[in-house]
Image: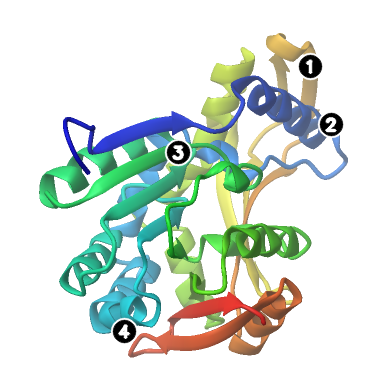
């Protein structure tokens, strides 16, 4: 890096018109279906991203602590395995745990570029400001877009470690994960690596506490999807008419988040000329949070042309990080 080149840049890779068109399609389809649903991506406006950061610090939410423990123990091994020129993080958020990888990168004299991909501009700006202040040697490129469709637009700067932390992959239902893994595989060269955070299958009591905390932050996060829809599509959905609901689907191994109507609901979205209704007890499905076994992860990665090379667990076997490469 020379001259007065900025150490943090922000680039939009998603087409804002296509993003809005996709939202309109998703909302119209989801709220007029027999079994109503909204995609979880619409949680993450700036306020929703801040709420999720608050969730990760709650005592019941073991995922962030378990993943941090693994990174504190194995970050140097992870970086040594790839020695990346750039660390590319999908769904970066506020990039708190990323610091452990960046420290290992610097001490091993690997690259000096961090690439963050997220749907929240506020999160990217926050991460970019804090990281460039904390690490004078680091350059940060933020890309505002949807990891479901925009990964191919992220430019390459040498050998990559692509990270997808927090078990965010569990938010993708089984039928969507193959396409995502193929998109990641297409980002990788033969020397690159893919670091994936995975929440492991565990007892129902622990899972229920993690997704329905006593302080009500998870409930506020869940309801924020209605706030986003109201704002973007000129709606009048009454948030107080819905209760946060979470349950374990034992058949799929996934936690299911939904908003259950506590009374009959009639609402309108003026921007798309849509009226819809729910009867008391009817739900809007909002999110999957799927849990995995090692065999399942290995099989799904292999189907996308990726092979697991390393696997690290936390001390209580609640969570894992896996490092994968392209099959040869």
Circle 3 residues within 10 Å: few <14, some 14–19, many ≥20: many
Q: Nearer the viewer, residue 265 or 135?
A: 135
Q: Position of residue 289 (x, y in %)?
A: 58, 62
Whichever of labels 1 and 2 marks the residue nearer the N terminus, that label is 2
- Most distant residue in the right direction: 34
Q: Position of residue 134 (x, y in %)?
A: 12, 50
Which residue shows up at 54% across the image and 78% down it? 324
Whichever of labels 1 and 4 marks the residue nearer the N terminus, that label is 4
Tag 4's secondary structure?
helix
Q: Position of residue 169 (x, y in %)?
A: 57, 63
Left or right: 68 as drawn, with respect to 257: left
Frontmost of labels 4 and 2 is 4
Q: Is residue 151 above or below residue 42?
A: below
Q: Which residue is under mark 4?
A: 77
Tag 1's secondary structure?
strand
Tag 3's secondary structure?
strand
Whichever of labels 2 and 3 marks the residue nearer the N terminus, that label is 2
Q: Is residue 61 above or below residue 42?
A: below
Q: Which mark is residue 32?
A: 2
Which residue shows up at 46% across the image and 58% down it? 212
Q: Which mark is residue 143?
A: 3
Q: CA distance from mark 2 to mark 3?
A: 33 Å
Q: Is residue 185 above or below residue 135?
A: below
Q: Which residue is under mark 1?
A: 274
Q: CA distance from mark 1 to mark 2?
A: 9 Å
């Amino acid at each position: 890096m020379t001259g007065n080149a900025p150490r943090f840049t922000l680039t939009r890779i998603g087409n804002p018109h296509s993003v809005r068109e996709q939202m309109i399609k998703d909302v119209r389809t989801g709220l007029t279906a027999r079994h109503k649903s909204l995609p979880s991506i619409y949680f993450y406006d700036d306020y929703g991203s801040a709420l999720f950061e608050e969730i990760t610090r709650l005592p019941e939410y073991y995922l962030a602590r378990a993943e941090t423990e693994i990174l504190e123990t194995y970050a140097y091994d992870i970086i040594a395995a790839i020695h990346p020129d750039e660390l590319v993080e999908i769904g970066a958020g506020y990039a708190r745990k990323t610091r452990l990888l960046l420290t290992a990168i610097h001490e091993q004299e690997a690259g000096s570029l961090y690439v963050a991909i997220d749907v929240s501009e506020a999160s990217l700006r926050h991460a970019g400001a804090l990281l460039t202040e904390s690490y004078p040697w680091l350059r940060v490129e933020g890309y505002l877009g949807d990891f479901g469709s925009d990964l191919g637009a992220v430019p390459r700067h040498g050998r990559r470690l692509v990270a997808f932390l927090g078990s965010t992959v569990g938010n993708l239902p089984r039928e969507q994960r193959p396409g995502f893994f193929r998109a990641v595989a297409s980002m990788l060269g033969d020397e690159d690596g893919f670091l994936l955070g995975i929440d492991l299958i565990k007892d129902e009591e622990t899972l229920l506490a993690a997704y329905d905390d006593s302080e009500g932050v998870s409930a506020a996060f869940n309801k924020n999807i209605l706030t986003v829809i109201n704002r973007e599509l000129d709606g009048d959905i009454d948030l107080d008419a819905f209760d946060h609901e979470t349950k374990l689907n034992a058949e799929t191994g996934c936690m299911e988040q939904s908003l259950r109507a506590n009374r009959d609901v009639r609402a309108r979205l003026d921007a798309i000329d849509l009226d819809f209704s729910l009867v008391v007890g009817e739900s809007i499905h909002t999110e999957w949070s799927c849990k995995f076994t090692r065999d399942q992860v290995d099989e799904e990665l292999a189907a996308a042309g990726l092979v697991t090379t390393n696997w690290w667990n936390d001390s209580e076997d609640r969570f894992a990080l896996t490092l994968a490469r392209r099959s040869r």
